[in-house]
Amino acid sequence: MRKVYLETNAICRAQESNISGTDLRQLLDERELTPVVGLHAIYELARTFLNKKNTDIAIKLFTIINELSPEFSNQPGVLMSQEVNNCLSNGKIHSLLNGEEKQQTIEEVRKLSVGNFDDKARAFIEARDNSFKIDHVKKSEHNIELFKKSPPSERVRTFEDVFAYYENDFPSLIIKIFNDALSEEIALAIIEKIDKYLTIRSNLRSQIYLMYVQLVQKAVPASDKVDDHRHIIEAAYCDAFITSDSQLINNANKINPNLEIIGWNSLT
């Protein structure tokens, strides 16, 4: 069975179409696809609880996930650390949650499916929102500074142009992704095997895409675009990706060239 990642709006489309988690599971089983949901999708869907008027919708969304009984992707930060360890000492890479972490996530989904949204969950969401905004600004500032230090000497128009132009800067970009915690030697070793380390590769390509937006479109990428990329990064070790977002359908393979992109409408 191939693994398919369901992006947030795929779950929302199921809820709007009155498709239960059980029915959705059957649709995927017929295509020999095993559903995977990311923790970022859970976070985004849980934000629905922040508006009390949307409590019923939030419960329906998590009921779908509970009935779907998916696998859960490991967090990108954990996966990237595992990829570094694999590069250094051949450590294992676990793309999916297992053991206690998986059971805790299953239990959290079950609680949310019956409307149990407590103060702890609310505080987690609000803290993550603030952290994301700060992180997004820092990355944008870093990329803009990179352009100032090394402006293109030739005209670049496409994502592929930007990707090729800054190829020699990939080690420094990887070091920045790890908040300067990696040596240049390790970054170079990762670059040599970058197609093996799918989470780092997706994160790197995401940064290049943001650079493309900043350089060619001369704009700071919208926070929802960065949020969308998080899903593609979380899906790094999946085979397919389901979304109804037209921009994601068009751009997902720039971040992860190996993903089969499945539009929601073609699934149902």
Image: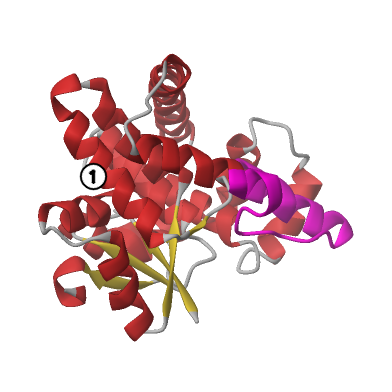
In the rendered image, which residue does mark 1 sit on? Answer: 60
Please tell me in which quadrant of the rendered image residue 10 appears.
bottom left
Front in this rendered view, residue 87 or 23: 23
Compared to 48, does 238 lie above or below? Answer: below
Compared to 193, does 75 lie above or below? Answer: above
Please tell me in which quadrant of the rendered image residue 179 appears.
top right
In the picture provided, is 133 more to the left or to the right than 244?
right
In the picture provided, is 89 more to the left or to the right than 194?
right
Front in this rendered view, residue 90 or 112: 112
* Residue 44 in sight in this render: no
For the point 45% across and 30% down, the residue is 139
Percent position (x, y) of residue 190?
A: 71, 57
State the predominant SS element of the stretch in magenta: helix
The range drawn in magenta is 77-103
Percent position (x, y) of residue 110?
A: 43, 42
For the point 71% across and 46% down, the residue is 81
- 82 part of magenta stretch: yes
* Residue 71 in sight in this render: yes
Front in this rendered view, residue 63 or 176: 63
- 244 part of magenta stretch: no
| Quadrant in the picture for the C terminus | bottom left
Q: Identify residue type, mark 1.
A: Lys
Instruction: Give the tally of numbered discs.
Output: 1
